[in-house]
Image (cartoon, grey):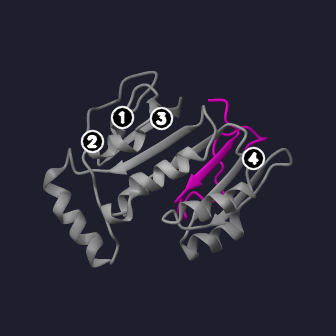
């Protein structure tokens, strides 16, 4: 991909500080609006001498403010990978998740990649209402979307092979060990 800057939105507690298999010179910015994630980030974030890992306490529903703060941490003139993993299904339609995504992507240079996963009940229709009810009891908005409703997040981007697929079908070098249903669609789109 060539990106050495990774902007990880809505990354959550479990992965803060876990930089993954990036180049030591990578600049990684985790962003979330959960105060618990903030406390974990303060304790866990580590950086290599060549690169840096940082945390941005921000709300994705305020993309312009988030972008302004992120520009202070990252050089947006360099290739950036924007990661929206398991995040946008927490935004109902009236919060304009497509517009938020477009605002974030449009602020980044050509050649960037958007990595997005999104909850769905397409392959588990019998669990859709049960899942929505469980989240509602916890006062958490949940808007699972169909494949056709996830596709617009990639509008104006070139989908990287294998395209927009159920998470359990995203194998690059060999087939999945067993066919199983998935509750997520996953895709990578590159700005033209």
Q: Which dot, 3 or 1, sits closer to the camera?
A: 3
Q: Which residue position holds label 2? A: 147
Label 1 SS: loop
- Whether residues under marks 1 and 2 lie with C-beta atoms below 8 angstroms apart, the answer is yes
| Residue drawn at point x = 41 percent, y = 47 percent | 117
| Distance of label 3 from label 4 (alpha carbons) | 20 Å
Tag 4 near tag 1, CB within 8 Å: no
Disc on res. 75: 4
- The kind of secondary structure the magenta stretch mainly shows is loop
What residue is pinned by disc 1? 164
Secondary structure under badge 2? helix
Residue 23 is situated, as x and y percent measured from the top left of the image, at: 73, 37
Q: CA distance from mark 4 to mark 2?
A: 33 Å
Residue shown at the point (45%, 25%) measured from the top left: 172
Mark 4 and mark 1: span between their CA atoms? 28 Å
Q: Earlier in the sequence, mark 4 or mark 1?
A: 4
Magenta part of the protein: which range? Answer: 1-26
How far, Cα to Cα, is label 3 from label 2?
A: 15 Å
Q: Secondary structure at mark 3?
A: strand
Residue 42 relative to residue 133: left or right:
right
* CA neighbours of label 3 inside 10 A, class few (<14), some (14 to 19), many (20+): many
> Is 39 placed above or below 122 here?
below
Q: Quadrant of residue 167?
A: top left
């Amino acid at each position: 991909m060539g990106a050495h800057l990774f902007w990880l939105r809505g990354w959550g507690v479990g992965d803060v500080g876990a930089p993954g298999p990036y180049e030591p010179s990578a600049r990684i910015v985790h962003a979330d609006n959960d105060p618990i994630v903030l406390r974990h980030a303060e304790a866990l974030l580590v950086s290599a001498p060549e690169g840096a890992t940082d945390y941005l306490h921000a709300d994705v529903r305020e993309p312009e403010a988030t972008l302004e703060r992120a520009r202070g941490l990252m050089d947006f003139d360099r290739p950036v990978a924007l990661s929206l993993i398991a995040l946008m299904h927490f935004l109902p339609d009236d919060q304009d998740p497509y517009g938020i995504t477009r605002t974030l992507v449009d602020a980044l240079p050509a050649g960037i990649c958007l990595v997005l996963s999104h909850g769905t009940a397409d392959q588990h229709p019998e669990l859709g209402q049960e899942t929505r009810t469980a989240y509602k009891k916890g006062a958490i908005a949940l808007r699972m979307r169909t494949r056709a409703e996830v596709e617009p997040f990639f509008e104006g981007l070139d989908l990287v092979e294998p395209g927009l697929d159920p998470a359990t079908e995203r194998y690059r070098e060999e087939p999945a060990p067993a066919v199983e249903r998935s509750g997520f669609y996953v895709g990578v789109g590159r700005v033209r």
